[in-house]
Amino acid sequence: MVGLKLGDTKIKQYHLHKDEPDKVQFEIYSLKEYLEESVGHLYPHRHSFYQIIWFISGKGKHYVDFNEYEVKENSLFFVSKGQIHYFDNNSYEGCIIHFNESFVAEDENYINIFLNHNIFHSFEKEPFFTINEQDTKEFHNIVNQLQAEMWVTSQFAHAEYLKHLLHLFLILIQRFGVKRDCDGLSMNNPSHTYFVRFRKLLEENYHAIHTVNDYAGLLNISSKTLTNCTKEISSQTPLEIINDRILLEARRLLAYSDKNVNEIGFDLGFEDPSYFAKFFKRQMKMLPRDFRKLNSSISEKLIF
């Protein structure tokens, strides 16, 4: 993996085999060894790939997008593309899995994958599951197979076997994992499909498209239909979800980058800087510059 700067920001971004497209887009490591060898995990960073972290033992804190989560034994964290996270300096036993979207997609069908494995789709949900001790045997079995297969690249159907094992791991999460705020999605429910497609479009376009009508148009449905879908699944309107996504990125850039407030507003699609400031204040009850001052200690953590 390679650490890069995003433009003139200080946010580190890591990629998985970015310059090696023919390489299997998957990795699995011992969590203890990975954390010991990578000082970057102590500092806020993000990935262009998906990450699963299984904390088998050890206690401490894991930080994801301005939230502090207590690490407990047999907790599994799911870090999506673009999320900013970092670890504390404690020691943990477990494993860490990396994979690109292309690795899990069947015929590049993003929707079916994330309806089947409803764990990475929401930025507003808690990013972790817990599993009971009695259910860990099957997880250990699959992890052991993944770790063994990782290094036998010349074996027949190597990538397919890894993909199969990863799918089994994700299925076990949905069977045995406990998540307080996780509601299941179904491929048989059109509303759920529209919801996932809307979230994917939003992730790709939040910096440029801000209206419900535009997203409904991209989905070829009415604004009312889109509103019914999102309220059914998340109890939020599409506009609330859009605003939450824009606000999250604004907070990330204010806390973790050295861009000025006007630049951040332009990056997020606000042609008038004053309108960005008004939007931010309406959502956060403070001006962007005040939020930056409040989070100055986070920015200082990036200097290493």
Image (cartoon, rainbow, N blue to C red):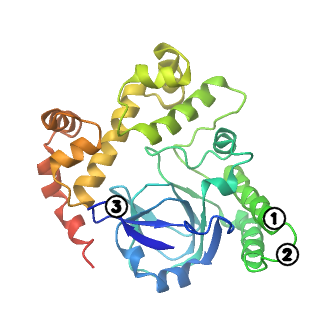
- Crowd class of label 1 (few under 14; some 14 to 19; many from 20; radius 10 Å): some
Residue drawn at (52%, 31%) of the image: 198
Give the labeled residue for mark 2.
155
Residue drawn at (41%, 23%) of the image: 212
Of labels 1 and 3, earlier in sequence is 3
Count of numbered circles on the image: 3
Give the labeled residue for mark 1.
161
Q: Answer with left or right where residue 149 lies relative to residue 227.
A: right
Mark 3 lies on a secondary structure that is loop
Give the labeled residue for mark 3.
6
Q: Nearer the viewer, residue 203 or 84?
A: 203
Q: Is residue 121 above or below residue 28?
A: above
Residue drawn at (77%, 75%) of the image: 149
Marks 2, 1: nearer the viewer? 2
Distance in Å between CA atoms under marks 2 and 1:
10 Å
Q: Are marks 2 and 1 in contact (CB under 8 Å)?
A: yes
The amino acid at mark 3 is Leu
Q: Is residue 295 above or below residue 199?
A: below
Distance in Å between CA atoms under marks 3 and 2:
38 Å
